[in-house]
Amino acid sequence: MKLSKAEEQWMEIIRKFEKRQGIVLSGQGVTIVLLKEKITPHSFGNYLFINREDYENKQIANEIITHESLHISQRHFLDIIFMELLIIFKSINSKLHNRSC
């Protein structure tokens, strides 16, 4: 069975949580999740995902952490979830419509 793009993204987030080694930035309400694999820094929920080696070697600009922290404080992940739900609804609606024709 083939997974939808949304399901693949959720599975990737779950895999990241399974591999995590988190550090909480004091006073900002952000948990940094350090990962072994090379990734582009990004956030979801209260979590900021960063490559561990880049973080420890100070190769992540403060502007990136600030930018992602703003996404976290503004709860941008809710926008993403809402849009994914709309895509799923549209897909189901389309399939039901095609079935009834």
Image (spheres, helix red, strand yellow):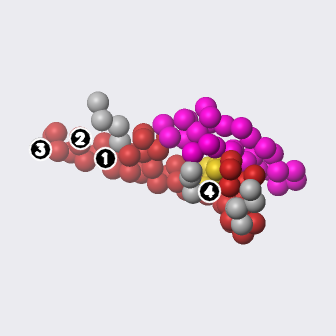
Q: Earlier in the sequence, mark 4 or mark 1?
A: 4
Label 2 CA crowd tier, 10 Å (few <14, some 14–19, many 20+) = few
Which circle, 2 or 1, is nearer the viewer?
Answer: 1
Residues in magenta, as a range: 11-37
Amino acid tagged 2: Leu
Asked if residue 64 is among those painted magenta in the image, a careful observer would answer: no
Q: 75 or 60, which lies in front?
A: 60
> Where is residue 16 shown, x and y percent of the image?
58, 39
Residue 17 sits above or below residue 93 on the image = above
Q: SS class of the residue under badge 3?
A: loop
Which circle, 4 or 1, is nearer the viewer?
Answer: 4
Amino acid tagged 4: Pro
Residue that carries the numbered disc 4 in the rendered image? 41
Q: Earlier in the sequence, mark 2 or mark 1?
A: 1
Q: Earlier in the sequence, mark 2 or mark 3?
A: 2
Q: SS class of the residue under badge 2?
A: helix
Q: 86 or 4, which lies in front?
A: 4
Amino acid tagged 3: Cys
Asked if residue 21 is among those painted magenta in the image, a careful observer would answer: yes
Q: Farthest residue to the right: give it.
A: 27
Q: CA distance from mark 2 to mark 4?
A: 38 Å
Label 3 CA crowd tier, 10 Å (few <14, some 14–19, many 20+) = few
Q: Earlier in the sequence, mark 4 or mark 3?
A: 4
- Residue 101: image tag: 3
Residue at the image point whose x is 55% and y is 35% from the top? 14
